Amino acid sequence: MEKKNYTFETHTVVTTDKYTLSMFRMKHKNTKDGAPAVLLLHGITDSADCWIMHNEDQAPAFVLA
C-alpha cells in the first residue's frame, strides 16, 4: 500500500464475547479528512489481504479508497 501512496492504520478491537479483531483503515494521499468509510468483510477462511491482492485498478480496497 505504501508503494502506491496509500497510508493505513491498524486498530485492535475486543468484542463483548472476548474475540480480538484487527481492523485496518486505508487512505489514499488525496483523500480528505472526514471522507466516508467503507467496511469490507472477508469470509471466515480468508483474510484482509483479499481486498488488496490484485492491481490497483481492480482490487476493491484500492478502488474504494
Image (spheres, rainbow, N blue to C red):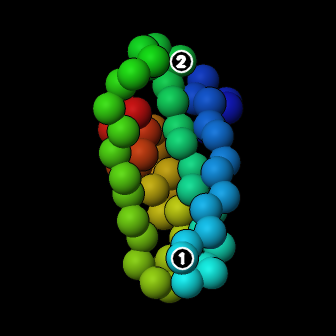
Q: Residue drawn 66% across and 48% down? A: 10
- Quarter residue 13 falls in: bottom right
Q: Position of residue 24 (x, y in %)?
A: 57, 50
Give amino acid for label 2: Lys
| Residue on which the image places disc 2 | 29
Q: Distance between the residues labelled 2 and 1?
A: 34 Å
| Residue on which the image places disc 1 | 16
Q: How many labels does the image show?
A: 2
- Pointer 2 with pointer 1, Cβ within 8 A: no
Q: Residue drawn 36% across and 39% down? A: 37
Q: Quadrant of the C terminus?
A: top left
Q: Residue drawn 57% across and 56% down? A: 23
Q: Circle 2 sits in a helix, a strand or a loop, which is it?
A: loop
Judging depth in this view, the residue of 19 and 41 nearest the camera is 19
In the image, is residue 1 above or below residue 45? above
Q: Where is residue 8 in the image (x, y as percent from the top left)?
A: 62, 37
Judging depth in this view, the residue of 31 and 14 nearest the camera is 14
